[in-house]
Amino acid sequence: MAGLIALVGGNEFRRDCESMDRALLARLGGEPRVVIVPTAAAHENPGKAAENGVRYFRRLGAQAEAAMIIDANSARQASFVAQIRNADLVYFTGGDPVHLLETMRDSPAWKAVLEVLDDGGAIAGRSICRRCSSSNTTRRRRPRSESFSMRFRLFRFASDAWHSTNPDCLSIGCA
């Protein structure tokens, strides 16, 4: 079975996204294993972002834990890679999409995410969609055109890396 990519527009871990998240968990079946990855929140409060996600998905009936991937070194850490490989859903929190892209690109953690998709699991993320549709610039204060270009590259990174071989499995949603 092919996996699913869910691009979340905002309000992750809140009631606004509950119906979408329940539908995603139902699609995965049983008691899905969710891994929260707070990479994009690394320069803000990744621990709080991860804690919010774990608490939220446990309340929805999933098994949830955090893989605290916040930099390139942690994206290579075997224990985090193993957590992702064992997940049914990998959820990227909101934050800085440029940092997310730079940290995950070509990492063992990203390869594990792609394995989850190939095995019929799902990935979801707020930073990808929120920043793609936002007029806000990134923390690095790039000019708007360069910032948009980086956000678009992040979207392409997330979707092209896997979607090209599974063209029927891209979903966009949330309130």
Image: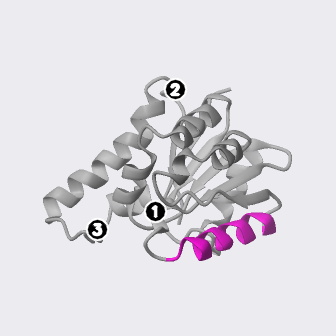
Marks 1 and 2 sit apart, C-alpha to C-alpha, by 25 Å
Give amino acid for label 1.
Ala
Write down the residue under mark 3.
Answer: 138
Give amino acid for label 3.
Thr
Marks 3 and 1 sit apart, C-alpha to C-alpha, by 11 Å
Write down the residue under mark 2.
Answer: 166
Write down the residue under mark 1.
Answer: 40
Foreground label between 3 and 2: 3
Residue 161 x/y as whole percent: 43, 33
Is 105 left, or right, of 45 in this rendering?
left
Secondary structure at badge 1 equals helix
Question: On screen, 61 above or below 169?
Answer: below
Marked residue nearer the N-terminal end (3 or 2): 3
Marks 3 and 2 sit apart, C-alpha to C-alpha, by 30 Å
**How packed is label 1: few (under 14 Cα within 10 Å), some, or many (20 or more)?**
many
Residue 103 x/y as whole percent: 42, 51
Q: What residue span does the magenta drawing correspond to? A: 45-59
Is 97 left, or right, of 54 in this rendering?
left
Q: Nearer the viewer, residue 16 or 80?
A: 80
Secondary structure at badge 2 equals loop
Q: Nearer the viewer, residue 26 or 44?
A: 44
Foreground label between 1 and 2: 1
Residue 53 magenta-highlighted: yes
Dividing the picture into quadrants, the one containing residue 47 is: bottom right
**How packed is label 3: few (under 14 Cα within 10 Å), some, or many (20 or more)?**
many
Dividing the picture into quadrants, the one containing residue 58 is: bottom right
Quick one: which residue is furthest to the top in this view? 165
Give amino acid for label 2.
Asn
**How packed is label 2: few (under 14 Cα within 10 Å), some, or many (20 or more)?**
some
